Image (spheres, grey):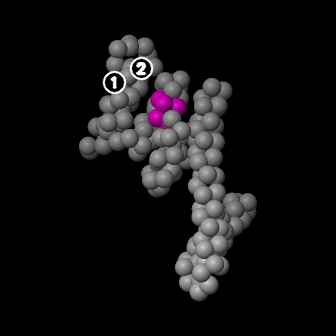
C-alpha cells in the first residue's frame, strides 16, 4: 500500500535524523552549543516517548471500544499490542502502566466465546507479566462457574501448557 510505504519511509527518515542529531551532539566542540543541543535532543526523546504512550493508550481504548461494539477490530488491537509488548520493553512498561492487563482481562471476559481472541489476549498477558500474570487472571475467575470464566480458565490452561511445550 502506498500510504503504508510512505509512512514507513517518513518514520525511517525522522528516526535516522534524530539518531544522527543525538550522535552528533556529543561531537560538538562548543560547550554552549553542545549543552543547548543536548537539551533539544532530550526534549525530542521525551516527546517521542510521550507520543508512544499516547499510541499505547489509543490502542487500549480501541480494544475496549471494539469489544463493547462487538467489532472484529479487537483482533487487530490485541495483535498490535502483543507485537509492541514482545518487541519493546518500553512498550510493555507503558501497557502495564496504563492498566493493560486489567483492560485485556475485561475484553477477554466480554468476548469469551471467541476462542482465537482469548488465546491472543492471554498471550499478550503472558508477554506483559509472564506465568504469574496468567495465573493471576485464572485465579481471579476461580470462584465462578459462568461460561465466560470457564472459557477463560480453559484457554489459560492451554496457554500455560503451550508455554512449557
Percent x, y of residue 128: 42, 43
Q: Residues within 10 Å of mark 1 (few under 14, many from 20)?
A: few
Residue at 55% x, 47% y is 80
Whichever of labels 2 and 1 marks the residue nearer the N terminus, that label is 1
Q: Would you name the residue on which mark 2 appears? A: 149
**Where is residue 151 drawn, in percent x and y?**
41, 23
Q: Is residue 78 magenta?
A: no
Q: Nearer the viewer, residue 117 or 102?
A: 102
Above-or-below relation of 83 to 134: below
Q: Quadrant of the C terminus?
A: top left
Q: Residue at x 35, y 14 (%)?
A: 143
Looking at the image, how many numbered discs can be counted on the residues? 2
- Say few, some or many: other residues with alpha carbon within 10 Å of mark 2 (under 14 / 14 to 19 / 20 or more): many
Name the one closer to the observer, 143 or 19. 19
The answer to which of 147 and 77 lies nearer the viewer is 77
Q: Nearer the viewer, residue 45 or 100?
A: 45
Residue 75 at x, y = what percent?
A: 56, 39
Residue at horizontal 47 percent and vertical 41 percent from the top: 96
Say which residue appears at 69% left-offset and 62% top-offset.
Answer: 7
Span highlighted in magenta in the image: 100-105
Helix, strand or loop at mark 2: helix
Q: CA distance from mark 2 to mark 1?
A: 10 Å
The secondary structure that most of the magenta stretch takes on is helix
Q: Is residue 83 visible?
A: no
Labelled disc at residue 139: 1
121 left or right of 32 in image: left
Residue 136 visible to the viewer: yes
The quadrant of the rendering that contains the N terminus is: bottom right
Disc number lying in front (2 or 1): 1
- Disc 1 secondary structure class: helix
Amino acid at each position: 500500500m502506498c500510504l503504508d510505504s510512505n509512512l514507513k519511509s517518513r518514520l525511517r527518515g525522522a528516526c535516522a535524523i534524530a539518531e544522527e542529531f543525538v550522535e552528533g551532539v556529543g561531537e560538538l566542540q562548543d560547550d554552549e552549543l553542545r549543552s543547548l543541543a543536548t537539551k533539544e535532543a532530550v526534549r525530542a526523546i521525551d516527546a517521542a516517548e510521550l507520543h508512544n504512550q499516547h499510541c499505547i493508550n489509543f490502542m487500549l481504548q480501541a480494544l475496549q471500544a471494539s469489544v463493547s461494539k462487538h467489532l472484529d477490530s479487537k483482533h487487530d488491537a490485541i495483535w498490535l499490542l502483543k507485537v509492541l509488548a514482545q518487541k519493546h520493553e518500553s512498550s510493555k512498561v507503558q501497557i502495564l502502566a496504563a492498566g493493560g492487563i486489567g483492560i485485556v482481562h475485561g475484553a477477554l471476559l466480554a468476548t469469551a466465546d471467541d476462542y482465537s481472541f482469548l488465546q491472543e489476549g492471554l498471550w499478550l498477558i503472558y508477554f506483559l507479566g509472564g506465568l504469574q500474570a496468567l495465573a493471576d487472571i485464572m485465579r481471579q475467575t476461580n470462584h465462578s462457574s459462568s461460561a465466560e470464566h470457564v472459557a477463560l480458565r480453559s484457554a489459560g490452561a492451554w496457554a500455560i501448557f503451550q508455554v512449557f511445550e
